[in-house]
Image (cartoon, coloured by chain):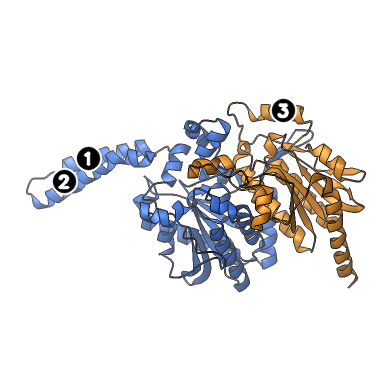
Amino acid sequence: MNLIVERERGLLELEKRIAELREANAQQPVDMSAEIRALEEKYAQIQSEIFSSITPWQKVHMARHPNRPTAADYIAEFTQFDELHGDRHFRDDHAIVGGMAKLGERAVMVISQQRGRDTKENLRRNFGMPSPEGYRKVQRLAHLAARLGLPIVTFVDTKGADPGIGSEERAQSEAIAGCLYEFTVAAVPIVATVIGEGGSGGALALSIADRIIMLEHSYYSVASPEGCAAILWSDASKAEEAATRLKLTAQDLLEFGIADEIIPEPTGGAHRDPAGTIARVLKNIGSALDELASLSAAQLREARYQKYRRIGAWQTERLETVKTGP
Amino acid sequence: MSAIDRINITVDGDFKEIGGDVLPGDPLEWVDKKKYTAKLAGDREKSQLSEAVICGTGKIGGFETAIGVMDFHFRGGTMGTVVGERIAMLLERARELQLPTVIFTASGGARMEEGMLALMQLAKTTAAVARYREDGNFLMTVLTDPTTGGVSASFAFQADVIIAEPKAMIGFAGRRVIEQTIRQKLPDQFQTAEFLLEKGHIDMVVRRSDLKPTLTRLLDYAAQGRARIAAS
């Protein structure tokens, strides 16, 4: 059960009540505006109680909220989109959606992870977990973008790579390693936005970028909290503690210098105002691309190299200084 | 096999270490059943190593080579900042000196205790591999038991020639995770070196006793090719 869905339940009931009263108020001579105001105050109070401080574990649930805007919702707000399909080897992976697009007037290559909204779509899209052929489609599109000089815009939203027999048989490791390589060498601007879940290597495959934008309640982690708990505590019920310790929130990643920018979400999460959230995200992607436009191919690649070269925390022999980058 | 033993049976004579003074921090101040710092101290004692990889330069069959050797005895060979940093330093030095590189892998994946900073080492090592290879340099990896997760999804499978030791377990997702997901037992052969060879994921499976002669022959081909380019 999604924790946020659970907590929202009371709020949604109040919302319904308020709407009903408003409608009644408009039709009847009796003035109920005092009752309405009281309910609205109560609503605001509960809302702030629930959402004024959200724990890392709640953020993980927010990122997984069934109504949270998915990549398709963002791509729908591009001026144009022509989807390109397939890896040219095995099949078209529906967990990856990509193609040529226009963001405003600017031609770009958009590449995204796409989860489903319902069970049927989730089965078709493998819950947003790409298979090797999905990663090979990503490589193909990134390579094409670099060849044509199109900036790359990605949307990251995955639990991680598909843990299945077929994926291993078709070299999942090599497929992800190939994505990392392609994004590393692409001499075009790359802007990645984590819109929901940033699950491990599967997320990294779409997010070696010059700018990494994260939504306020998205997360990005070396492993899922559940997976981490199972490995280190041998106890999946420690997931909440793992979520806290892993430092996986957008705010943590900004501090580490991995994320460059956080986009605020409306109170209650992105799904409470999808249109507004999406508009803000697209605007900021546009601004990031504007900033990167002035860099030459060589400058872009050098800056990207240095960015990743610096990330980490280590000490040299004397142990006096701990370096964190960048 | 320990990294030290591996170096002893692979390198002709002297081995000059690179990045030995780069040591782990504790950026997340991590604690699970134990403190990360305590686990590191325990591993240092047990393995007599300062981290999960030793890097340096030395001769293999007469060919000066940059060499990285991972060791599963230290944190299960997991890649945290220090592994990423040392591998990147190795490849940068190799590029500077125009040396071929051989990396022996043994890893359970990215190191949980360093969180996202560990995951970012996949990006760091990839950046170093890409820059190194673009200059026409030759990278080989030898995958030993086990090579999984973040290491297999980065430099292990970005090499020009990929060798594996017999029966080594190699894959992205761990066997247990897959079995739990699909709720059935996997065949014994699954994710072994021999399975990967048959599927076309790796170039060859080579017994330990044949490794040094095999690496030497491959280094010789590459050296001749590189010399021809240099002369033209």
In this view, the residue farthest toward the left is A29
Image x and y of residue A271, in percent: 37, 51
Q: Is residue B12 left or right of residue A220?
A: right
The hue in which chain B appears in the rendered picture of the protein: orange
Which of B207 and A316 lies nearest the eye of the viewer? B207
Alpha-carbon span between mark 1 and mark 3: 58 Å
Are the residues tagged 2 and 3 within 8 Å (C-beta)? no
The hue in which chain A appears in the rendered picture of the protein: blue
Q: Amino acid at mark 2?
A: Leu
Q: Chain of mark 3?
A: B
Judging by the rendered image, the residue that carries numbered circle 1 is A39
* Residue B55 higher or lower than A290, as above or below: above
Judging by the rendered image, the residue that carries numbered circle 3 is B41
Are the residues tagged 2 and 1 within 8 Å (C-beta)? yes
Q: Residue at image x 73%, y 36%? A: A321
Which label number is shown at residue A21? 2
Are the residues tagged 1 and 3 within 8 Å (C-beta)? no
Q: Chain of mark 1?
A: A
| Callout in the foreground (1, 3) | 3
Q: Is residue A245 visible?
A: no
Quarter occupied by the N terminus of chain A: top left
Q: Is residue A141 visible?
A: yes
Which of A305 and A136 lies nearest the eye of the viewer? A136
Alpha-carbon span between mark 2 and mark 1: 10 Å
